[in-house]
């Protein structure tokens, strides 16, 4: 950085970034996989569970209760508990809890999304002669998309952020840079780590917003319908 | 024809929504179910397309018990319009209208062409086809709802308070539109409303239901207004029954006087000798200008120079006795000016002639529909 005295440690040492770029890239890729795979798995599980919850409301509250308890557990504690099962410093140890966190956000999103289908729309679909399955696929799920996508954005961003904690059990993607920088009293990796985590979250979020624009042009300016 | 044969709907908690309803909705006519909330009118409607199944009794369409038909198949043959239109927010207008043709497996292009045709039939700009429902006004959405219900040309149309969520002006135009469409398509329509004026305006037959789902009276509107079966029906019909009934008495046969009009170009002196107290002044094109009191004519000049009193008109052959009565009340002369469809004066209806017609109407059993 120009203007900073030579003897003081600068906030960012660009030469360190240059030298370590391949390693940083690998951490970024690892981080992205560990953050996004659990969200994808979470969505796949949340859809049927959410559908069941929307149909049998009695099932919904207990399910959300269980998932919320999981959500309330500190991530670090869950990582540590999982080590004997999934191994130290493995992706699984990080991804399994993150998938549950994603579920905690996505199951209510699916249920709320289906609940956002106006009663008169559902009734008119019945009266037009839709079979139950076709009504679900062609009317109810498409109308639920905006609410589900809103939940997906929350789940994605928080998942990207939570992966870093895995560094404490040896597998945290970019989180490794925080520990490295802290242990060596060397700020550059910390700054790089923060910048890339934020960037990753922002890119993922932007992609979801674009997907929403493409999938639901009808919801862009919701009026009375 | 739709037949309710001793139909009862009883819920598990013992509530009876519809109680032993027997009713026929004749083919090609509008049958209105009207009553206060809780009278089971919507429940009855939904038993026709099996959104609700009857506990006892049978509902038949052209002699076929609806319980013997698989519900989705049954429903694709029955148009359905509900209060908030129930359009699919995620589908463009054209696709909304083409819903049932799609379900019936029509060729995509044929379904779209049919949808475009229907949009025009219900008075919508085809340019709206590519829009989404939220981009349309409430009245436009309701028209789309009607187009969608008609898309596969079902013989039966069920309408559940379709016009009650729009403002009165739009509602009136949608009602006119329905009557126009019905003249064109001649569907068997069952129409549910809580608005007795709407029932009387639209119905060929009106079934008044009371709370608890019992039929109070089934009659054509004129009979209903003239002879309500009991106090409940009379009260539900509300005030001004006598005047409202006149809407159903034709003004066609009213005798008109043609000697009480004078052109504006006429000299005052030429009409001074008229025996009647009032003269209707018309322009060169035979359109009405107003009334002049014969006893207050000035010394000279033409009728164009005289200050004219206001007037009321009714359309000969189209307006009912109610329209004629209204026209007489708009003028200090107490007479009404009868015009034809193009607005030209055909003659004058005097208060005496009208009173005679009103006396006959009150004595008669209903008279013709206007």
Image (cartoon, coloured by chain):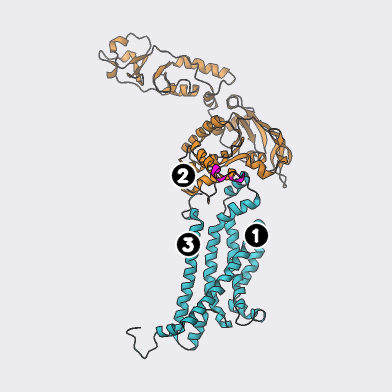
Camera sees residue B216: yes
Mark 3 sits on what residue? A210
> SS for tag 1?
helix
Mark 1 sits on what residue? A53
Residue farthest to the left, as pictured: B300
Give the dominant element type of the magenta stretch: helix, strand or loop: helix
Q: Are marks 2 and 1 on the same chain?
A: no
Label 1 environment density (alpha carbons within 10 Å; few <14, some 14–19, many ≥20):
many
Mark 2 sits on what residue? B128
Q: Which chain is orange?
A: B
In the displayed structure, B217 sits above or below B293; it is below
Q: Which chain is cyan?
A: A
Q: Nearer the viewer, mark 1 or mark 3?
A: 3
Camera sees residue B20: no
Tag 3 subunit: A
| The one of B198 and B87 positioned closer to us in this rendering | B87
Tag 1 subunit: A
Task: Work out how far the residue at label 2 is from the one at label 1, CA to CA, in angstroms.
Answer: 38 Å
Q: Nearer the viewer, mark 2 or mark 1?
A: 2
Q: Residue at x 51, y 57 (%)?
A: A215
Task: Work out how far the residue at label 3 is from the one at label 2, CA to CA, in angstroms.
Answer: 26 Å
Image coords of residue B30 (percent x, y): 59, 31
Task: Work out how far the residue at label 1 is from the one at label 3, CA to CA, in angstroms.
Answer: 29 Å
Give the residues drawn in magenta, as a range.
B102-111
- Contact between labelled residues 3 and 1, with CB atoms less than 8 Å apart: no
Tag 2 subunit: B
């Amino acid at each position: 950085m120009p203007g900073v005295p030579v003897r003081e440690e600068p906030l960012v040492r660009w030469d360190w970034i240059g030298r370590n770029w391949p390693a940083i890239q690998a951490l970024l890729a690892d981080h992205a996989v560990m953050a996004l795979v659990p969200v994808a798995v979470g969505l796949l599980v949340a859809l049927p569970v959410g559908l069941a919850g929307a149909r049998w409301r009695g099932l919904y509250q207990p399910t959300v209760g269980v998932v919320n308890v999981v959500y309330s557990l500190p991530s670090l504690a869950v990582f540590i508990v999982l080590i004997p099962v999934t191994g130290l410093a493995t992706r699984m140890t990080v991804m399994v809890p993150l998938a549950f966190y994603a579920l905690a956000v996505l199951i209510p999103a699916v249920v709320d999304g289906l609940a956002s289908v106006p009663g008169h729309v559902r009734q008119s679909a019945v009266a037009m002669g839709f079979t139950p399955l076709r009504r679900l696929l062609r009317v109810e799920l498409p109308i639920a998309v905006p609410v589900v996508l809103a939940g997906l954005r929350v789940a994605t961003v928080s998942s990207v952020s939570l992966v870093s904690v895995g560094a404490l059990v040896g597998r945290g993607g970019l989180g490794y840079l925080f520990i490295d920088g802290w242990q060596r009293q060397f700020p550059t990796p910390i700054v790089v780590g923060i910048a890339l985590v934020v960037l990753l979250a922002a890119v993922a979020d932007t992609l979801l917003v674009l997907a929403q624009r493409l999938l639901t042009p009808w919801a862009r300016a919701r009026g009375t319908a | 024809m739709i037949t309710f044969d001793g139909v009862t709907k009883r819920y598990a908690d013992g509530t009876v929504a519809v109680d032993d309803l027997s009713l026929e909705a004749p083919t090609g006519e509008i049958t209105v179910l009207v009553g206060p909330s809780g009278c089971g009118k919507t429940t009855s409607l939904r038993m026709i397309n099996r959104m609700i199944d009857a506990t006892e009794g049978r509902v038949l369409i052209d002699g076929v018990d609806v319980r013997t038909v698989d519900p989705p198949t049954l429903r694709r043959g029955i148009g359905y319009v509900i209060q908030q239109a129930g359009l699919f927010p995620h589908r463009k207008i054209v696709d909304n209208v083409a819903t049932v043709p799609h379900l019936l497996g029509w060729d995509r292009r044929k379904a779209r062409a049919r949808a475009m045709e229907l949009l025009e039939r219900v008075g919508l700009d085809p340019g709206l086809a590519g829009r989404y429902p939220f981009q349309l006004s409430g009245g436009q959405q309701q028209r789309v709802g009607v187009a969608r219900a008609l898309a596969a040309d079902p013989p039966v149309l069920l309408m559940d308070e379709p016009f009650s969520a729009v403002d009165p002006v739009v509602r009136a135009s949608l009602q006119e539109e329905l009557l126009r469409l019905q003249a064109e398509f001649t569907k068997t329509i069952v129409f549910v409303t809580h608005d007795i004026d709407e029932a009387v305006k639209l119905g060929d037959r009106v079934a008044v239901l009371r709370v608890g789902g019992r039929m109070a009276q089934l009659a054509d509107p004129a009979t209903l207004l003239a002879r309500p079966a009991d106090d409940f029906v009379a009260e539900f019909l509300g005030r001004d029954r006598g005047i409202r009934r006149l809407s159903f008495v034709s003004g066609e046969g009213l005798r008109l006087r043609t000697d009480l009009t004078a052109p504006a170009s006429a000299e005052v002196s030429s009409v001074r000798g008229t025996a009647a107290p009032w003269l209707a002044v018309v322009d060169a094109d035979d359109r009405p200008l107003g009334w002049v009191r014969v006893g207050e004519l000035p010394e000279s000049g033409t009728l164009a120079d005289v200050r004219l009193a206001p007037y009321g008109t009714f359309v000969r052959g189209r307006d009912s006795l109610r329209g004629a009565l209204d026209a007489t009340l708009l003028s200090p002369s107490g007479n009404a000016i009868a015009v034809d469809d193009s607005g030209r004066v055909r003659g004058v209806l005097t208060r005496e002639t009208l009173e005679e017609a009103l006396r006959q109407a009150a004595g008669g059993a209903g008279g013709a529909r206007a």
